[in-house]
Amino acid sequence: MKILVTGGCGFIGSHLVRLLVEARGCEVVNLDKLGYAANPESLQDLSGHPGYRFEAVDICDADALSASFLRHQPDAVMHLAAETHVDRSIDDPGVFIQTNITGTYQLLEASLQYWRSLKAGGGGSGQAEGFRFLHVSTDEVYGSLSLDEPAFTESSPYDPHSPYAASKAAADHLVRSWHETYALPVLLTNCSNNYGPGQFPEKLIPLVLSKCLRWEPIPIYGQGKNIRDWLYVGDHCEALYTVLTKGRVGETYNIGGNNEWRNIDLVRHLCGLMDELGPGAGLGPPASYESLIHFVADRPGHDLRYAMDTTKIREELGWEPTQDAGSGLRKTVEWYLEQWLNG
Ligand SMILES: NC(=O)c1ccc[n+]([C@@H]2O[C@H](COP(=O)([O-])OP(=O)(O)OC[C@H]3O[C@@H](n4cnc5c(N)ncnc54)[C@H](O)[C@@H]3O)[C@@H](O)[C@H]2O)c1
């Protein structure tokens, strides 16, 4: 299978590209504009691989997208390219509207034209029938839960609160409408917070670890009582491949780790792992890394709680996370420490 991945140089995209090329034997064409969050070095070792191609393309550029489709004739699209950091969306929402909404629209248009050309071409390969467009989205589109509400299901109403969440919600609606209106064979996934090696350091877990390593204050919004569900990035990528290959066209699948943490508890846990594994372990830092925690003014519109009901993907497609909080977080801390020690 030849898959066109957008945003393949980002955190999740680079894990996904590696899974597809190395473990699933797929050919991958990675389209990424190489924005601030991209880390092309993470895929450097694939540069000579016959199953991997990279093209520096902005998904808002309709001509460049059409040319890539024409050149590579993919069997599927996995769409991850996005602006992803909520704080940045509050400071500068325009680029979120541009990439997450307009970019998704351009990609849908290019995919539709390409899919129609496959159908018009006839042929016996079944490429048009098998073509899929998988749109990767977030739990944040559903809004916020109170402490005792049940987790979000695929039929929970949309209620996004940040410019990031609203732009992803708009993109989700566009993708569904391209299916309803033009019959484009789409699939959607909404996933909870990811963590793992190689995440851009503005996100909570790498931020905490880098603050520990520099012995700098660890900022926590409000009182740290906001709750997020955390999923190991490798498990998310397996889920995406499962949905692409087994999911029912037009359907949405929620993905999550069944692993809810209050931010403050997660940060304390990470500090504990750093006390155990970090530089100075054995000798001991001047005090526990926990002493670095300090509370800062809350983020505007900060959602209290997200949680995902993953019954559908578990029962229908047989996907389950493989990493629990203990193994996944330990592995992640070990990876960041190794990077740090190797400079
Ligand atoms: N990280 C999470 O916890 C999480 C959870 C659920 C869903 N998601 C979704 O998964 C996807 C990937 O998230 P991530 O955390 O890997 O993001 P990321 O910010 O690490 O990477 C995004 C990538 O997209 C690229 N990109 C941005 N704008 C582009 C454009 N206009 N054209 C081409 N490429 C562009 C960037 O260069 C970068 O490589 C996003 O759609 C995000 O909404 C992320």
Image (cartoon, rainbow, N blue to C red):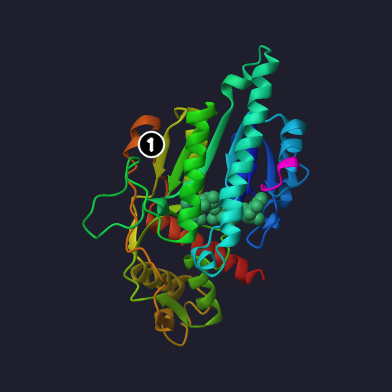
Looking at the image, is 44 positioned above or below residue 225? Answer: above
Please name the residue shown 56% across and 80% down the image: 214
Q: Where, by quadrant of the figure, is residue 253 drawn? A: top left
Residue 1 shows up from this direction: no
Please name the residue shown 48% across and 72% down the image: 208
* Amino acid type at mark 1: Ile
Which one is nearer the viewer's eye here, 94 or 68?
94
Looking at the image, is 206 positioned above or below residue 157? Answer: below
Position of residue 107 in the picture relative to residue 69 (left or right): left
Residue 127 shows up from this direction: yes
Residue 62 magenta: yes
Q: Where, by quadrant of the figure, is residue 267 drawn? A: bottom left
Q: Position of residue 87 (x, y in %)?
A: 50, 68
Position of residue 154 in the picture relative to residue 215 (left or right): left
Q: For the C terminus, which image quadrant? A: bottom right
Which one is nearer the viewer's eye here, 196 or 153?
153
Please name the residue shown 43% across and 48% down the image: 191
Position of residue 250 in the picture relative to residue 93 (left or right): left
Query: Residue tagged by mark 1?
Result: 313
Which one is nearer the viewer's eye here, 56 or 53?
56
Residue bounds of the magenta highlight: 59-63
* Label 1: how many Cα within 10 Å (few below 14, some 14–19, many 20+): many
Name the secondary structure under disc 1.
helix
Q: Where, by quadrant of the figure, is residue 265 drawn? A: bottom left
| Secondary structure predominantly adopted by residues drawn in magenta | loop
Which one is nearer the viewer's eye here, 276 or 219?
219
Q: Position of residue 112 (x, y in %)?
A: 62, 30
Seen from this angle, which residue lies furthest bottom? 286
Residue 172 magenta: no
